[in-house]
Image (spheres, helix red, strand yellow):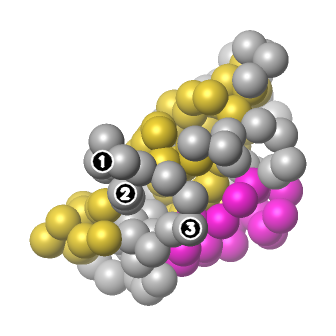
Amino acid sequence: MCTEDGGLYSCGGNTHGECGIGKVSEAVTNVTKVNNNQPIICVAAGATLSLFISKLGDAQLCGKNEGISQEHADNEVVLTPTKISNQKYTFASAGVEHALLITMERKLYGCGRTTEGQLSFVA
């Protein structure tokens, strides 16, 4: 979750580092501050990943990278919010292991796991 001033906090399942607190654990039971150097305006939580959009338009990922970030290997666990591309975004939505992102140019991008047709095609 993010605060009005862009602070970032998390809680919940963390078996793939999706809470972004720098480590894997069964769960984060207390609301915990996530260290981030940019104010956040959008949060999207999937089953094994979290996405954040900063005020500057940077998309950040933590948790299991299932084809979302080109900066990380597939299935790599990302423990802290990490920028996923140089594209600028305004919004993100996350599913189990996939994401939809809208750019500042109002283009829609889908990425992540597609084995069940999550992105309207099967890889």
Spatial CA span between label 2 and label 3: 10 Å
Q: Quadrant of residue 110?
A: top right
Whether residues under marks 1 and 2 lie with C-beta atoms below 8 angstroms apart, the answer is yes
Specify the segment rendered in magenta. Answer: 69-84
Q: Dividing the image into 4 quarters, which one contains the C terminus?
A: top right
Vertical comparison of 107 with 77: above or below: above
Residue topped by disc 3: 37
Q: Quadrant of residue 106?
A: top right
Residue depicted at x 57% and y 29%: 91
Residue topped by disc 2: 7
Asked which secondary structure carries label 2, the reply is loop
- Residue 71 in magenta? yes
Q: Give the x, y percent position of residue 112.
A: 69, 43
Indicate the amino acid at tag 2.
Gly
Spatial CA span between label 1 and label 3: 14 Å
Residue topped by disc 1: 3
Q: Give the x, y percent position of residue 67.
A: 75, 51
